[in-house]
Amino acid sequence: MIAAMKNPSRLRVLVTVAAGFAGSHLTEKLLADRDVEVWGTYHHAKPAPDAAPGLHSVECDVRDGAVVRALLADLRPNWIFHMAGQSDVGGSWAMAWQTIEANVRGQLNIFEAMVQASLDAKVLVVGSNNEYGMVGPDDLPIDEDTPLRPDTPYGVSKVAQDLLGLQFYLSHRLHAVRVRSFNYIGPRQSSKFVTAAFARQIAEIEAGLRDPVIHVGNLSAERDFTDVRDMVRAYRLALERGLDGEVYNVGSGRSVPIQRLLDILLGQARRAIAVRPDPARMRPSDVPRSVADVSRFRQATGWEPRIPLEQTLHDILEYWRAYVTPVRAADSRLPVTR
């Protein structure tokens, strides 16, 4: 079936979990190029046909080595963007083994399948700023030579993925390019993440689904935020222009307090909203400030973020307004949540 659908004249790209947050934005970016043929994996639920017109969907649990080997041997993509995995940093404390298993096993299965199939493809290893973990003021801005001191189970899993990319480049000469992505945000992100959590609460307040109080965690932490649509543009450039075996930080190069994000969103809200600290939203460890040195990536690719923070936050809030409105319309008797 796959062989019959392949077009040998086009660049064949595989995106694992193409319907995920970053995966869906990346897929849209790739599909805009007529010279690219895009295949996307799914595991639990197949994407709707109109979610990404032109996408070829194929079922694959990347934790299953036999399935991954069969897929890569049959499809033989030119590029692989490995986007699958467990991405909830805070949630990784409660499901440490599941996080490590999902992220490390999936990455290893892809590499081993590439070796077995003698696949001459470029593969993007998506790491994280959480690999750097417990950084201090003397480490800022964080460059690629900053020591890796992960302080979350998620961070440990991303270090393992990162170093697997280096190992398979050194031992098998796989065309692996590694990126350490700093915080990226945008429409479609789960409300487990800070900006989406703020925006969803605001949208539910506006829709009358909860009291006009927003519950928050640590607002003093500063993070390096990039719009997901800028980030996936960077991912493509990483495979186009990045060096095999190299690692690149990708971020905005500036830090923003969480309080600033909340202030912008509250300024866009249609109702007056109070703010209340919630101890349940605090993490066991939290670095006060994180900001990337992205000079290596910019020199290699020429990439710069384009979308202003205010626009990103506006789009996130509009996404959640559209999400909660049908819920409200479906049942006007829904109780106010607290």
Image: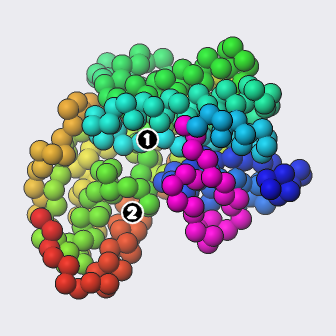
As helix, strand or loop, the secondary structure at mark 2 comes to helix
Between 65 and 20, which is closer to the camera in this rendering?
65
Amino acid type, callout 1:
Gln
Image coordinates of residue 34 in percent, x first then y, are 78, 60
Q: Mark 1 to mark 2: distance in Å?
A: 21 Å
132 w.r.t. 264: above or below = above
Q: Main secondary structure of the magenta part?
A: loop
Whole-percent x, y for residue 30 in the image? 68, 55
Q: Quadrant of the N terminus?
A: bottom right
Which of the colour schemes (rainbow, by chain, secondary structure, one colour) is used? rainbow
Residue that carries the numbered disc 2 in the rendered image: 316
**Residue 1 appears in the figure:** yes
The answer to which quarter of the image holds residue 263 is bottom left
Q: Is residue 59 magenta-colored?
A: yes
Of labels 1 and 2, earlier in sequence is: 1
Q: Which residues are magenta?
A: 42-63
Element under disc 1: loop
* Residue in the image at 40% along x and 35% along y: 99
Badge count: 2
Q: Find out whether residue 242 is within the magenta segment.
A: no
Name the residue rendered at 16%, 56% in the picture.
215
Q: Residue furthest right?
A: 9
Label 2: how many Cα within 10 Å (few below 14, some 14–19, many 20+):
many
